[in-house]
Image: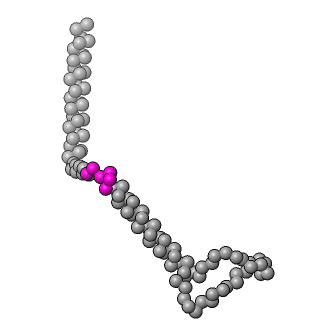
Amino acid sequence: MATSNRPKRVVVVDADNPLVEIHGEFFWREDHDAMVAAARVAAYSEGYDAGRRDGQRENTGQTVVLRRRRSLPIRIRGVVWRLVFLALSLIVLTTIGNQFMAHR
């Protein structure tokens, strides 16, 4: 990953106190970006494979049910017929109720 024109030893100093060296493992930005990209690809691949295995394990077949919705005029017609039936039922029940009360 490292190119040959980069220095082998780099001294990193603290921004607040330039007399203090910071020790640790440091990477060039380009090398870091390449490592992160490789890790991202590997993690995506592992997650994709795990999801695919889970999906195949639990796949018992899909059932797709298609229902045709009735159009608006047909639904309106159904509501009107129900209202007509309700009105006629009320008329019949009222008539029967009046006749029952008249005999008392």
**Image point 58% across, 81% down: which residue?**
29
Looking at the rendered image, the quarter that the C terminus falls into is: top left
In the rendered view, tell whether residue 99 sits above or below residue 32.
above
Position of 88 with respect to 28 (left or right) is left
Magenta region includes residue 57: yes
Colour approach in the figure:
one colour
Q: In x, y percent, where is residue 39?
A: 48, 71
Q: Is residue 59 above or below residue 9?
A: above
- Whether residue 69 is visible, yes or no, is no
Nearest to the observer: residue 89 or residue 40: 40
Is the residue 65 above or below the residue 1 in the image?
above
Residue 75: % across, % down: 23, 45
- What residue occupies the far front of the structure in this picture? 8
Q: Position of residue 42 (x, y in %)?
A: 44, 69
In front of the other: 11 or 30: 11
Of 6 and 41, which appears nearest the observer?
6
Number of numbered discs present?
A: 0
Residue nearest the viewer, comparing 62 with 6: 6
Q: Which residues are magenta?
A: 56-61
Q: Is residue 47 magenta?
A: no
Residue 97 point in image, percent of width and height: 25, 17
Which residue does the image show at 54% across and 81% down from the upper left? 31
